[in-house]
Image (cartoon, rainbow, N blue to C red):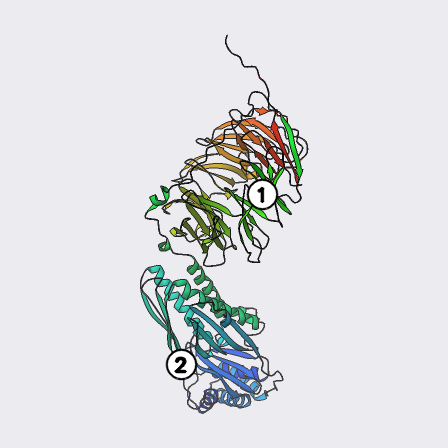
Amino acid sequence: MHERPSDGASRVAEILLGSEAHGPVPDLVELTTAVTSLCMLKHRKRLIPLPDHPVEYALVRREQFIEVSRYESGGFRDPDLVNRPVPAQALLSACAEAALARAEREAEGMPRQIALRVAERALRARVLPDRDPPHFHDIAGGVDPAELDGAKLAFRFEAKVPAGQGMGSRITSYADAHALLFQGRLEAYVNGKRVLLSDGLIALPIERMVRAVQHILDARDEGRPIRKRVLSEGFGVEVKCSRPDDITVTFASVHTEPVSATELDVGEVALPILTLASDFIRALTAADRSQHKNLLVRGLRDEIRELRRRVRSRRRDESFVNEDPDRLRLAPRVAPRRAPERVALGTAVPPRFSERFSITIDGIDTDGIFLTESSLIVGGCDNTVALARDDGRILWAREARGHRLTLAGDRLLREGEGGAIDVCDVEEGEPIFELEGHGGDRATQRPIVAGGGAIPMIAILSEGVDRLSALDLRTGERRFRFATRSKKPVYAAARGRMLVLADEEGAVHGLDLATGDVVWRFTADTRFVDTPVLDDDTVVVRSAGGRDGRGCFYAIDLFRGNLLHRLPIDGHVRGAPILAGDRMLVVLRRAGEPLLCAYGLRDGVPLYEIDDPGIASGAGHLVHEDVLYVHGAWGELSAVRVHDGQLRFRTEISGGEGDELPKSLVPIVHGGVLVLPGNRVSMVRMEDGLPLRIQLPCDLIPDSLHVAENGWIYVAEASGHLAAFAPIPQLSLVRGGR
């Protein structure tokens, strides 16, 4: 119980709180014990909660004084007394006399003995000199005023945190509101205008703004308008919104007239406030590491993280579908080129080849070799060259410095190390345009070539993990840019007129390549963690985290953007899903065994499961005419019927000598033959898997393998060697009649 108004207790209260102060005071025995400990420098700080009031006192030793603070317990509450300096000797003497008087009034028993013992200890105590002068840690954070960059709302703070604010080397965590009652300066920048919000206690205004963010998100999630004021002494913030993209936030303080920021969306209000609060906690705990154990600090930090997650996890009502999908579905597509007539490689008589030319190119990029109608384009570290297909003579050459090549129709796009880009004509090698680089590292992902026909040929370039731009390959104009709200990665894929982007904020966007407009968006409480896989009318994207836990596959209509189905992943995924007709094939590892699982592409219905033919082990694969061909690392070839999972054939192919393997094992279809890259080039008949005993005088590892329509084979090795082989004409006896 707090003290009844006796002479001793009244004198203690007057010294503690001042002559005009009133309200409950701590139990006299508790107070005397704490003051004695502070005077003897056994502690620097003591917290005294009152047993019958939601009030807490904080006593801090500073030189020859004890600073007294009083505030409501239970969180971030406005204090009614902050760091009032009281002479330590006067308070110690008053407490000792009052405790002794109380002991004399108590009846015999334990309470009397305790009060007497505490009083005697206080009477013997003396105020030891504090030889550790008070010092402060300067902390600051928030936005740099020189880098506002048009931000509608931003904040900055500066403060002095007294050393020793924490509770020392306590093992347990604790709630210490007093540790947040230090002086500082808090400013807001509203549309570039600087506004002073607080010149005193800054932790409370920051916490009030976090509370305002919580109210905004609650209203958004419940689909209701809001008008809410959150106040502390000398500061207030009001939020008003009728919809999530039209929020008005007003700040008021004793230092300035109210100022408002209008027409903000949820992110424009919430993220600057949460960033301010995060910077504040980070700076505070860096200056005083004991604050890591302060439950109020930890609670605010956890709340900030949760609010950030809610801001960045777009609600389902942010999804929208394309109401005119037929405009994109029926849009004119690229006119298909007439397929070149292919010379059949013998399926009855084993084909024979002769070498026509070979060349060595330093620093060859095996991913930068392209076969065109008239030439073979090869990228090296020093030069980009176009070779005649029949004899290897150089048609044109351009100097290179590690350029990375991408073929786009009759254009060749080259990326330099610093992000510089030049586009040249494939036939002559003449430059069409050049763009200066951004000076940063080159993106790891090669450009995605899209468009053509009814829309310009476009290259989708990565400008960072979270940004993409569309480059018009006719003019060099940047047609549009896309960036995520955070710095998290975005994954892109294109088909026809559609560009599909998935990000780790839980959104899949459908963009019209002709305009850059987002024509649909699908959102979920998850993270999309892989490149979308597209077919003619469906998008499949894999998620992980959030409500999806281990992960799910989402199937979305490519042109409308509506969810077709959500398929939980029952196992560990190995590789991207394979879309084949109306089937989706996924390799899952369950109980240590890989399985090839088939589902309906548009409905997610399970269809069959078979043993994995080798995809989980890195085999190359392709789908051709409803058959999945899987080429394993050591020469085995399996053919699986996509419709029902039946094995058509399995063939073991001699792998040749050595154990080196090419970069890719994906088979190449040429007529009725599969050309297989391995530690040597092999061929099999597609109808039954019969190996053809070809004679190809080549000992190169086919890190790059191209088969021309006339049957010529071009083999390049990562060492820089490139060779061309032509089929030798053969006579065969054809049985006929008279």
Determine the residue positioned at 43% across, 63% down.
307
Residue 460, image x, y percentages: 48, 49
Residue 169, image x, y percentages: 59, 72
- Return the residue nearer the eye: 623 or 296: 623
Whether the residues at callouts 2 and 1 have beta carbons within 8 Å, the answer is no
- Return the residue nearer the eye: 52 or 297: 297
Near mark 2 (Cα within 10 A), the count class, few <14, some 14-19 or many ≥20, is some
Determine the residue positioned at 54% across, 71% down.
283
Q: Is mark 2 on a helix, strand or loop?
A: loop
Q: Is mark 1 on a helix, strand or loop?
A: loop
The total number of labels drawn is 2
Task: Quote the CA–CA distance across marks 2 and 1.
Answer: 66 Å
Determine the residue positioned at 35% across, 55% down.
317
Residue 173 seen in the current view? no
For residue 362, side relative to residue 620 (left or right): right
The image's mark for residue 254 is 2
Q: What residue type is labelled 2?
A: Val
Residue 254, image x, y percentages: 40, 81
Residue 243, image x, y percentages: 33, 62
The image's mark for residue 444 is none
Residue tagged by mark 1? 368
Splitting the image into 4 quarters, where does residue 565 fall? top left
Near mark 1 (Cα within 10 A), the count class, few <14, some 14-19 or many ≥20, is some
Q: Earlier in the sequence, mark 2 or mark 1?
A: 2
- Return the residue nearer the eye: 274 or 499: 499
